[in-house]
Image (spheres, rainbow, N blue to C red):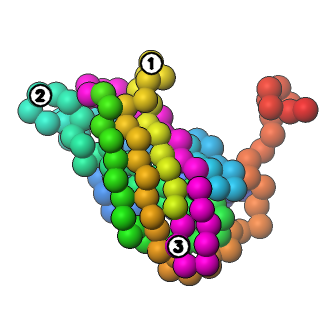
Amino acid sequence: MATTLLEYFNELRTQNPFSWVKDSEVTTVEPGHAEMTLQTNETEYCNFRGHLHGAVCIGFADSLMGTACFTLGKSVSTIDINGNYLKAVKGGTVLRGVANVEHSGKTTMVATARIYNELGEVVHIARGTFFVVEERPLPDLPWRFIEEDDPNLI
């Protein structure tokens, strides 16, 4: 059972039916913000040239943005998504994704995502519009446990 919202979101992630989810992890959640990693591999996620298939990038971005929306207590369904592939990604790369909610309305939400390679270069940018299916309050848990040596402590 989850003791933080970060653990809660990782438990939810495992319910996603897509095979690549097993290689992903939610690393940061805050209201309107989510970060995840995805460990790619050559056999499952790449095209014949050994580059990551575009569907994996856009799927990862969609999941990132949906998670960012869910941090605001809203269950969503994608209405529209678009993405720009900026750089090829070789299989075996660990990707880091960052998503933010740009608009949180009663019936729709808009989010953006950036996906980075291991060098910190942006390889994909996405924007999505989401239909708010229902309000889904988050469990009463802390976002994360704060470590004493956390550099973000004031």
Residue 11 visible in the displayed image: no
Amino acid beneath label 1: Leu
Instruction: Report x, y in % for residue 48.
Output: 9, 33
Q: Can you say whether 118 is above or below 26 in the image? A: above
Amino acid beneath label 3: Thr
Eye-nearest disc, 1 or 3: 3
Residue 58 visible in the displayed image: yes
Give the CA distance from mark 1 to mark 2. 21 Å
Quick check: is 98 in the magenta stretch? yes
Instruction: Report x, y in % for residue 113.
Output: 48, 46
Question: Of helix, strand and loop, which one carries label 2?
Answer: loop
Mark 1 touching mark 2, by CB under 8 A? no
Within 10 Å of disc 3 (Cα), the crowding (few <14, some 14-19, many 20+) is some
Q: According to the image, label 2 marks what residue?
A: 49
Sooner in the amino-acid sequence: mark 3 or mark 2 = 2
Within 10 Å of disc 1 (Cα), the crowding (few <14, some 14-19, many 20+) is few
Give the CA distance from mark 3 to mark 2. 38 Å
Q: Nearer the viewer, residue 36 or 68?
A: 68
Residue name at image x 38 percent, y 70 percent: 79
Eye-nearest disc, 3 or 2: 3
Residue name at image x 33 percent, y 41 percent: 84
Residue span colored magenta: 88-109
Q: According to the image, label 1 marks what residue?
A: 119
Q: According to the image, label 3 marks what residue?
A: 108
Amino acid beneath label 2: Arg
Sooner in the amino-acid sequence: mark 1 or mark 2 = 2
Residue name at image x 36 percent, y 58 percent: 81
Q: Is residue 89 left or right of residue 8?
A: left
Q: What quarter of the picture does the N terminus occupy?
A: bottom right
Give the CA distance from mark 1 to mark 3. 34 Å
Q: How many marks?
A: 3
Q: Can you say whether 68 is above or below 130 in the image? A: above
